[in-house]
Amino acid sequence: MNATEAPRATAGSRQRAGPGLRSDAILLSKTNPLTLSRGERVRDSYPLPGGEGGRRPGEGIAEAVASPEERPLTRPPGTLSRGERVGGAGAALLLVVLLPLVGGAGPERPEVRWKPAGDRHLVEVAGLDRPTLERLRAVEFDSARWNAILRIVVRPGTGAASDRRSMLGSYQVEDGLVRFRPRFPLERGLTYEAVFDPSKLPWAGDRTPDAPPIVAPLTLEAPSNVATTSLVRVDPAVGTLPENLLKFYLTFSAPMSRGQAYDRIHLLDASGAAIDAPFLELGEELWDPSATRLTLLFDPGRIKTGLKPRDEAGPALQAGESYTLVVDEAWPDARGRPLLRGGRKPFRVGPADHTSPDPASWTVRAPRSGSRDPLLLTLAEPLDRALLGRLVTVLDRDGHAPLGRIEIGADALRWSFLPDLAWREGEYRIVVGRDLEDLAGNSVGRPFEVDRFQVDPPKERAEPVTLRFRVLTRAAE
């Protein structure tokens, strides 16, 4: 390097500092007071704040490492002024002006960080200036453009080649940050890289063509081989199910991994042979937010009459036959450990059910005033357990819902409400949502399958069903 040339200092470049120079001493920017113009020169020995001396002629510029803790240098006593010269070598240094990604006294370049959030890990990019954030907020990028700016991948060598594609998720500009939320939890035992490329930011002009990507790695602890998660229940729990059964619910004792459900669940006939493709295989499995309950849908094309899949392959279940639902023990949980135990649910198949459930046929047992006895409903048929927990509510005479908890019997034939406070005498209502379903998907509002050519088709309910009961004192009973 000639004496008149200076190393180019771009955001993220690293250059060795000479003795006595601090690494944060000469990170220059357009707004930094310490800038040189034509004719300005550097004296041989420049006492930097906190340094131990000056720079000897011919030694390199201090390293310009953009990290969150570095700050621009404000002009100290002894700052360069016009006409000052370099002693010894007598050479002018051409210093590069860096265009900052942040304004004011923030970090010289963005910081990329991982942030745990429940069973997910968010990626946040901090330190972008307000104009950049406003540009990002104003435009509507597709996933390819966002991936060019910020992508999350599995580090090569730590996972299958197919895992090195960018993770699916959503991008938001909020709270002064660019934030990425992955669609699925990260797999343990792998190293992930969040790669932020500032050169792909939507500048008015290409201001940072040489800015290197910022890479933030994250390694999750390898899974333990000790199995602790198990399948705790399968719903419906009754032993005889309708031929047009719509779904199963599988509940586990801890969060499960995603993407393997259709390879780990099998439906066997009475001879032990697997039923071919009985379930609706969705690209995104239907897990609850805790990843402990899976909704497993039968293929509706093999349930409804007159549809091509049913005509070609027949129904998945046939009345009068016996079947077994099998869950593999090797299915890994969210920590990558196999199940402590899988599960088997044997059941028989009865006739198809095409009738909507009727709440008017339910039996209501009202509690006594002043007690905390449960309000009890006895249903005419097993209903969808998950929907029972949220589509049946209790209201007092003022339309307020008392605080308490709902319990559902194992066979989904009994529903009860246990109040936190004692019942008060008066009128109450039980409101049943029209979307409450039976095991075949027939809802209170309409049957799952409607024959449009039927002479007198069933009428649909547009409103919830209301059941009234009265809480009485013992003397009034």
Image: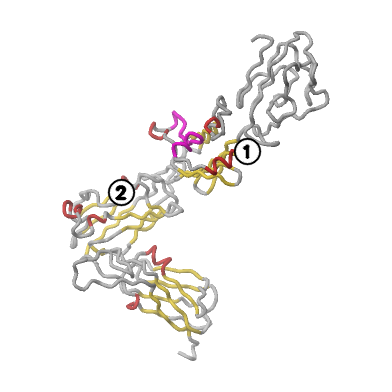
Identity of the residue furthest to the right in this view: 77
Which residue is more in the foreground, 446 or 392? 446
* Residue 384 visible: yes
Q: How many residues crowd around disc 2 within 10 Å: few (fewer than 14), some, or many (20 or more)?
A: some
Q: CA distance from mark 2 to mark 1?
A: 45 Å
What percent of the width, then of the height, locates residue 181? 50, 44
Q: How many residues crowd around disc 1 within 10 Å: few (fewer than 14), some, or many (20 or more)?
A: some
Instruction: Give the residue drawn at x 35%, y 57%.
Output: 249
Relative height, residue 400 to residue 137 (above, below): below
Q: Point out the stretch of residues depicted in magenta.
A: 143-158
Q: Quarter of the image for the N terminus: give it.
A: top right
Instruction: Check residue 152 for magenta coloring.
Output: yes
265 left or right of 400?
left
Instruction: Give the residue drawn at x 39%, y 64%.
Output: 387
What percent of the width, then of the height, locates residue 179? 54, 43
Which residue is more in the foreground, 325 or 295? 295
Dot label at residue 129: 1
Instruction: Give the residue drawn at x 44%, y 28%.
Output: 157
The residue where tag 2 is placed is 281
What percent of the width, then of the height, locates residue 272? 21, 50
Relative height, residue 236 to residue 171 (above, below): below
Indicate the amino acid at tag 1: Asp
Badge 1 element: loop
What percent of the width, then of the height, locates residue 132? 59, 38
Q: Quarter of the image for the C terminus: give it.
A: bottom left
* Residue 53 visible: no
Dot label at residue 169: none
Which residue is more in the foreground, 399 or 79? 79
